[in-house]
Amino acid sequence: MDQIPFGTNDFAENPEPRVPCVLLLDVSGSMGGQPISELNEGLTIYKDELVADSLASKRVEVAVVTFGGMVQTACDFTTADAFYPPNLTATGDTPMGAAVNQAVDMVHERKQIYRANGIAYYRPWIFLITDGAPTDEWKSAAQRVIEGETSKAFSFFAVGVEGANMDILKQLSKREPLKLKGLRFRDLFQWLSNSQQSVSRSTPGDEVPLQNPTTPDGWAAV
Amino acid sequence: MTDYFDPRGNLVRLGKKLGSGGEGNVFELQGDLRLVAKIYHRPATMAQAEKLDAMTTLATEDLLRFAALPIATLTQTRSGPVAGIVMPRIRDQAEIHTLYSPAHRKSHYPDKDWGFLIHVAMNVAAVFDSLHQNTIVIGDVNQGNVLVSTRGTVTLIDCDSFQVSANGRIYPCEVGVAHFTPPELQGQSFHGTVRTTNHDLFGLAILIFHLLCMGRHPFAGRFTGVGEPPPLEKAIEQFRYAYSRNVKTNMLPPPQTLMVPAVMPALAALFERAFTKGSELSEARPTATEWHVALRDLKLQLKPCAADLGHKYPNYLGTCPWCALEREGAPNLFASVTAHLVDRREGELNASLDQLWKPLLDLRQAASDCVLQKVSFQNLHVTANPIPAEIEQNQSFALLLGRCFLGMLALLAASWWFPPMLYIATALSMGFGIWWFVLNRYYGLQPEIDRREKRLRDSIARLRVLESEGAKELDSIRLAVEQEFHRLDLTKAEIEGLRPRYQADLDALNLQRERRQLDAYLQSHLIRSTTISFVNDWQKSTLESFGIETAYDLNEIRLANINGLSQIARSALLDWKAAIQKKFKFRPREKIPNVDRNTILARYLRQREDQEQALMSGRSSLELLYNQLQEVRSRYQQRLDVAAQQAKQAEADVLSLPE
């Protein structure tokens, strides 16, 4: 039997509205070396930033799904204080379609849990980071993403690292996919945390104007 | 850059930067530590500047005690646009959500119980009341701009957004947080909207609800209607107050929440008025004063829970609602209070038991010393009973008769010479003989001797019987004492074992945390993505088919079950795991939090208290037994004394008999 980590996960102890976010991370072989270590570094910064914000630390819930050879839930939904960034290693091919499907399922299940416990929630985020192209069937996953976005069931963001197939990402995501400049994962996660901090201060259901990451000194390019 | 001017043209020097926010940065003011300057990222517009100027006229000493109102505007040049404001500095206060959230409260306010939360709610109501009295509308009520000190006082910040009236104009509040926005304003733009105190009172009711109900939002519940549950702001807009007596809201309270109507009926009635349909009508919501009164009443009715130090609840309830929540599976929402009350009391676990134990030892010793005293005849003084006069008379008469009898025997001998006398002498000697015999045997000294000797024998026998009966009775009580003492000795051993057991629990907790971190760390190391000498891809696939994918999965037993894996590959894998494990660093930031440690400590202290109570009641039961012992002993001692007296008397009586 697994234990519930001590912290703000328990709904009775922390009934704040939740901002669920699935980080969908590509850990296929091509991410090996510098990219994966920058990604790991970025995750640590992400955690530290969230923990430092007392409101976001109670509201933002992170889950990490990795795909590289296979799809793995490296970390199930947890508030920032109990989030220990997994040390990711790169290996295998890129089953992105299956990973997206899993993320959509997880978001759906999490919402059921919130409802059963009377916990308000913001529109969930699915945040995909990849440096390649899917090696499995991804069209049905893309369909689910479009449906989810249209019904406002979640927001889907796609970020391509150098080498990513931006054309497929465009088809996968309703929003314009972003291209990471160089390996600026730290800036990316800083931005992610900042955005979620502002979301966690907004109203559930509201569209939050996010800081544009594609400015000249931002981390992304379109 | 650090020099500004106030409206009167005085130079204002900024010091250290204290923080930054969405609107601007906050700096220390050189020369006045009670004030700070907020410099906006962008200079204020003409309209904003006018409002700020208006506000500075409202900042009375009284209001400044609990609202960081702008005191003066700042400009970069003497006639430039307003670049910032001067306002009171607020120290050592935290956003109110860190108090009402149980998760944060246990680390930020570990000693604060429900009474404190109610008290803060009263203070929030008082602040709202003062502002409303001064025709100020807060407008943007939210979890971030109400600050609380550890003493429970409340201060409002971001006051430049307040809606104020001055110079015959209303300067509106143009911002708001939807969770605190009343139904009638939901979905509307705040731009140009004139806010009312009735709007503020919705926000006040939400804050009070948060404080009293462990951070729950009154409109977040289990949706029982059809379709997707409405998001929070829709639920507010549709008056779906989840704790309402009115079931038509289609919203039920979430699991493991306080039964608001039952636990605080008076406040529940106010919440109904604040949150249900009709509350949007002018001045319909309970005023800050009404809240203040109801909260004060609730606070005065609180009583401590007998089962948990940290719980307080209204005295009109039969059972503790916090304990009830725990029985429903909720965590102890005031665990930190209980824990705080025992903080640094570890020492009490090894406190010496001597003071408790010594009286028990003494009692046991006294009980074992409580024996019957050997009867001593030495000091008994008796006077032998004289032989009754009658017997003396009979005795002398018998002597006379004996002589007569002897005389008659002489006569009988003389009748040899005078035969006719034989008959008479025979008759007389027989007569005297029988008379003498009868008198001597039955009415003389002999029966007295027999009687006295028998009495002596009897009294000695009685003494022996008393002695053995008494000893037996005392022994049985002493056995009870020993049994009780043995039981208490076990209790004592248990108390002495509490400290080591507490330590073991702490160690286990620590180990668990370290273990969990280590497990996660090992799980993050995939075999497939690592080059391990002597382990080729094919072997890796084999391992995967056995579910062995990460360093965590590796152990000798599991590896032993895999055919086709060479010994050298096995040890290479285990070596690899060992090398990874070596690199693992325990994150000490995750040392056992005080509250966790104290929760365990509280449990052990309570056990110790119970056990000490057991020792204490053991002492009284020992005392009871000891009293019983003494009583039995004195009873027997008395009876023995009497018997001894009698025996001594009997002895003297026997000794006093003539030879």
Image: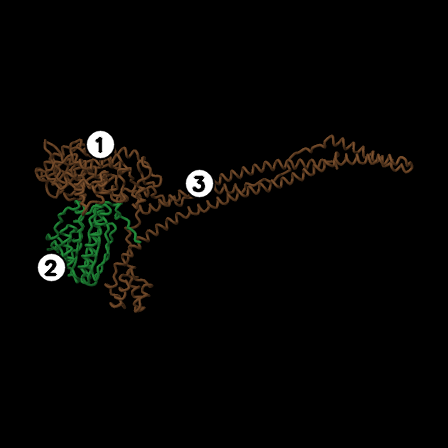
Q: Mark 1 falls on what kind of element?
A: helix
Instruction: Give coordinates of residue B531: x percent, y percent.
Output: 24, 65
User: For the residues marked 3 and 1, what is the alpha-carbon distance in whole angstroms?
Assistant: 51 Å
Mark closer to the chain start, 3 or 1? 1
Q: Amino acid at mark 3?
A: Met
Report the front residue among B554 and B265.
B265
Q: Is residue B428 above or below residue B486?
A: above
Instruction: Give coordinates of residue A65: x percent, y percent.
Output: 21, 56
Q: Is residue B297 above or below residue A2?
A: above
- Chain letter tied to brown: B
Q: Mark 2 falls on what kind of element?
A: helix
Q: In terms of image quadrants, where is residue B42?
A: top left
User: For the residues marked 2 and 1, what is the alpha-carbon distance in whole angstroms?
Assistant: 63 Å
Please identify the quadrant where the N terminus of chain A is shown. Answer: bottom left
Disc marking residue B32: none
Mark 3: give few (<14), some (14-19) or many (20+) Cα within 10 Å. Answer: some
Instruction: Give coordinates of residue B494: x percent, y percent.
Output: 42, 47
Q: In terms of image quadrants, where is residue B32?
A: top left
Chain identifier of the residue bearing label 3 in the image: B
Which residue does the numbered mark 3 point to in the structure image?
Answer: B616
Q: Relative to residue B317, is residue A60 drawn left or right?
A: left
> Are the residues tagged 2 and 1 within 8 Å (C-beta)?
no
Which residue does the numbered mark 2 point to in the structure image?
Answer: A167
Disc 2 with disc 1 on a shared chain: no
Chain identifier of the residue bearing label 1 in the image: B
* Count of numbered labels shown in the rendering: 3
Report the front residue among B304 and B320.
B320
Which residue does the numbered mark 1 point to in the structure image?
Answer: B289
Mark 2: give few (<14), some (14-19) or many (20+) Cα within 10 Å. Answer: few
Give the drawing colour for chain A: green
Q: Amino acid at mark 2?
A: Asp
